[in-house]
Image (cartoon, rainbow, N blue to C red):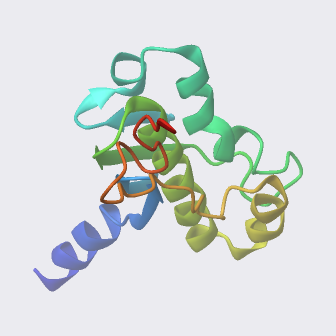
Amino acid sequence: MDKDKKEVQTKDKYIEAIGRRKTSTARVRIKQSAKTHFIVNDKEAKEFFKTEVERRLILDPIMKGIPASGTKSDTKWSVEAHVSGGGFHSQAEAVRHGLARALILSDIALRGSMKTLGYLKRDPRAKERRKFGLKKARKAPQWSKR
């Protein structure tokens, strides 16, 4: 019985990482599988991300980040992501960030290529807060001299 339990644990072994962008947070889990498939919030990636730009964004770490002559280039990944907050584009960038981090946890040799492509850096830009006395973050009310 103990052997069966150990096999089940190694069978469902996955690597998890978190990616962020603006107010979006993505929890990405990857595991090796027979064929590559990408699920985001319990939907296929093509259903969840409608535009081609967002679909390309989430696949960038796998397509560009893993070199063709790399050790795990022939490995196929099953990717499952849960994303919340923000808009669709920032959610796609959060998934990309989390996927890049997860791939590095699986193979540390990928770190150099991911770093040069800029997939590991969390984009620090966020919405500036509104200040009192102003209409928006920097927009002042109309001013008249007389």
Q: Is residue 110 left or right of residue 122?
A: right
Q: Position of residue 143 (x, y in %)?
A: 46, 38
107 sits left or right of 20 in the view: right
User: Residue at point 30% right, 59% down?
Assistant: 132
Please give the name of the residue rendered at 55% of the width and 55% of the height, measured from the top-left corner. Answer: 97
Q: Residue 2's image quarter?
A: bottom left
Q: Is residue 1 placed above or below 34 in the rendered structure? A: below
Q: Residue furthest right?
A: 69
Outermost residue, bottom side: 2
What percent of the width, then of the height, locates residue 86?
34, 42
Q: Looking at the image, which is closer to me, 110 or 134? A: 134
Report x, y in % for residue 12: 30, 61
Q: In the image, is 74 to the left or to the right of 76?
A: right
Q: Nearer the viewer, residue 15 or 20?
A: 20
Please tell me which residue lies in front, 54 or 127: 127
Q: Is residue 113 above or below residue 138?
A: below
Question: How many badges with numbers are in the image?
Answer: 0
Q: Is residue 24 above or below residue 42?
A: below
Q: In the picture shown, does residue 26 fall above or below 43?
A: below
Residue shown at 55% from the left, 37% from the top: 58
Left or right: 103, with 85 as reference point? right
Give the quarter of the image for residue 88: top left
Furthest residue in direction left, as rendered: 1
Image quarter in which the N terminus is found: bottom left
Tell which of 5 and 13 is nearer to you: 13
Q: Percent x, y for residue 47?
A: 34, 17
